[in-house]
Amino acid sequence: MRLICVSRYKSSLGSYVEGQDVDVNDETAELLLRDSPGSFRRESDPVPEPEVEPEPEAVEEAAPEEPDFSAMSTETETGIVAPDRRARGGRRRR
């Protein structure tokens, strides 16, 4: 029986590469087809057409949100914005 290797295969039954024609007896052919059905096809079987994956739909990105500065204190005299440490359990300085 003639088989055509459609993907690499290696075992105690032999080593075959993609596209190789394999001429084996019926018993060995059935073992190969049972052992790795995705690696071989019969010569008489029609050639399967490759599956075309649909393109993913475009997803609209959300507009970036404004940063939340509610946990921040007001600007200091130097213009640096200092975090409000009371939210983390720190004590308030006087």
Image (tube, rainbow, N blue to C red):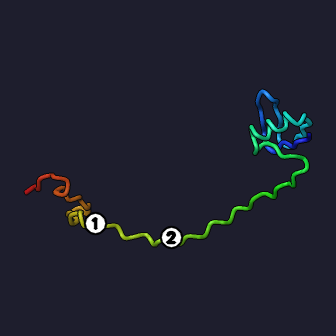
Q: Residue furthest left?
A: 94
Vertical comparison of 58 with 83: above or below: below
Q: Which mark is residue 69?
A: 1
Q: Which quarter of the picture shows residue 30?
A: top right
Q: Is residue 56 left or right of residue 25?
A: left
Q: Amino acid at mark 1?
A: Phe
Q: Is residue 55 above or below residue 85?
A: below
**Which residue is at 81% across, 29% downward?**
13
Query: Residue 66, located in which quarter of the rendered image?
Result: bottom left
Q: CA distance from mark 2 to mark 1?
A: 23 Å
The single residue placed furthest to the top in the displayed view is 12
Residue 22 placement, left or right of 58: right
- Residue 32 image offset from top left, x and y in percent: 80, 37
SS class of the residue under badge 1? Answer: loop
With respect to residue 64, does 90 lie above or below? above
Marks 2, 1: nearer the viewer: 2
Residue 82 falls left or right of residue 6: left
Q: Residue 67 versus residue 27: which sits nearer the camera? A: 27
Q: Residue at x 75, y 59 (%)?
A: 51
Q: Nearer the viewer, residue 83 or 81?
A: 83
Q: Residue farthest to the front?
A: 27
Q: For the N terminus, which image quadrant? A: top right
Q: What is the secondary structure assignment of the residue under circle 2? A: loop
At x 78% / y 36%, what residue is drawn?
A: 9
Crowdedness near tag 2: few (<14), some (14–19) or many (≥20) residues, C-alpha within 10 Å: few
Residue located beneath label 2 in the image: 61
Give percent across and percent down for residue 50.
78, 57
